[in-house]
Each structure stands twice: as structure tokens, then as C-alpha cells.
Amino acid sequence: MHSKKEIYYSIMLSEICSGYTKFNFQKKLIFYKHPNCFDIAKLKEKYLYFLNRAKSAEKKTNEELEKEFKENGLWGIEQEKKIKEKRNYLEGLKDNLEKAKTKQEEEIIEKNIKETDREISLLLNEKDKLFSDSLENYVEKKVKEYELFYLCFNDKNFKERYFETEEDFNCLNINEITEFKISVYSELRSLSAKKIELLILSNYFQPIFGSNTKESIPFYFSTKQEDRTYFQNIFTYYWQIYNGVIEADTPNYIREDPNKLIKYIKAKNNKEKRKMSPKDKDSQEMNINQVDFSKVKNANDL
């Protein structure tokens, strides 16, 4: 019987390979196309369009609004400090949760995590309301909305868009747009870069490395970077980092935990790097810099 993690990783890998994520909106199945470099270029083009429109409308930047709110006492250093402190406290709670020895300890820490998370959300919501009409937030909002129009389809072959025109999307009311965004991004959350990294180092995926240690590109992806999706490029990036580095003598208790495996590999690499001569280190840096993932970096800028 497959574990929940194996099923989760199986679905995740299937989505990355197929190039789309399915979600439901108002009882309708919709396919979100994972963007390739051409889609990303189109979104960048729209970003510049909305940026110029915002500048023409003389919208204030976050920096200008922050200065204004600071003078009025609406938002400033104290509020930012409070958010930072609560985030640090939250990270500490999460670390303590992993070290909890009893069920009672876990329940108390989980309760504190939920409460702290709620407090951070309230502070961020307060900030979002104040800065909602800034130049940066306006542009980001409009690009995200265009992305949903541009990448959502009625079929997995991307022949028919869910919204026929941009106007159709703009006809949605605020509540419908919010519901649509939540439907999409709640499904895409599983494809974060960190989770893709953990997938590659999971027990589910490790056996695949055995027969493909010489492959620089996963065999089920195109060898051409422009034909791969954003998530496939992230996957390929971590594939090239970790492929072949998991050795037979790696302890099982480390193999079974991707987070421990990441720390183990980094510690081992640092140890080996300290033994290198300065010439070897320079050579290694040159090899790393030759790997071109500029399109992945551009996607992260969206």
C-alpha cells in the first residue's frame, strides 16, 4: 500500500511532466498551463504595459506611500519590526515542533503556531489595505489577473481558453476573482521550488537516479530549454545539482528525510571544498556559472 507522501509525490511529478495543473471553479474543471519561456515573455510584456499605465496615472510607489504613512503615523518601523519579530517567533515554534517529545507538547506548540500565524496575517492584511493602490501592487495585481486569463484553458491540449477574451475575465466581480485566484493558487502551492527540491531527494524519487546518473536533463523532458515549462526548468536545476551525489554509503535515516539529506549533502560539499586548492575552487565556480537558467530566474521575477 502506498503512503500519503508517495501518492503526493506521484501526483506532483505527474503535474510537472504533463505541463498543467487541474483545478475546479464553479463545478467546472479547468487546466492551468504551466508557462514556458514564450508565455513568460508575454507576461513580461504585459508587465511593462501595466507599469507604463500606472506611471501615466501618477500612482505613488510603495516607498512614497510608506513615507506618507510614516508621517501620518499609519505605518512605519514599529509595525515592520513587529511582523519581523512574530515571523522569527513562528520559525522558532516550527523548530520546537520537530523536537517535541510528547503529543501534549505538539498540541500546545501547534496551537501557538496557529495563533502566531493568525496575528501575522492580520498585520499583513492591515498593510495590504494601506498599500493596495500603490504603483507596484497595482501592476502586480493586473499582471496576475492577465496571467489567469492567458494560462487557463478548458482542455489539457490548450486549444480553448476558459475566458474567451480579457473582457470576459474583467466581468467577474471582486468575490469571483478572489475565489478564482484561491482555486488556482491553492493547487499550485505544491509546486514551489522548495517542494520540487524535496521531491527529487525523496525516497519515492531516489531510485530513478540509479539508472540516469549520466543524464544532465531528466529523460521525460525536452532537451531544449525553451520547450520546457517553468516548473520543468526548476526540476532540471535541482536534478543537475543532486543527480549522482546520493552515494551507497549514505545512512538510511538520512535518505528517508529529504531535509536531512539536503543538510548532509551541503555539509559534505563544504567539507570537500575546504580540501580543494584555490585553482580547483575557481574551476568549480566556472562550471557552475556555465549552467544557464536565466529563464527560470526571469520567471521568479513575476
Image: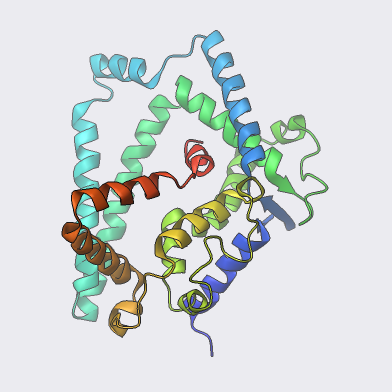
Q: Position of residue 77 (x, y in %)?
A: 20, 28
**Horizontal and vertical percent for residue 130?**
39, 26
Closer to the camera in the image, 169 or 38: 38
| Direction bottom: furthest residue | 1
- Residue 83 visible (yes or no): yes
In the rendered structure, the answer to whether residue 299 lies left or right of residue 125 reads right
Considering only vertical position in the picture, is 248 above or below 43? Answer: below
Q: Is residue 151 above or below residue 115?
A: above
179 on left or right of 267? right
Q: How many numbered callouts?
A: 0
Q: Residue at x 57, y 26 (%)?
A: 47
Which residue is found at the position 56% from the left and 66% from the top? 12
Q: Nearer the viewer, residue 221 or 256?
A: 221
Residue 26 shows up from this direction: no
Residue 129 pos. (x, y %): 42, 30
Up-down relation of residue 167 to residue 295 (above or below): above
State which quarter of the image contains the N terminus: bottom right
Q: Nearer the viewer, residue 33 or 201?
A: 201
**What is the quadrant of residue 193 in the picture?**
bottom left
**Image coords of residue 10 (percent x, y):** 57, 73
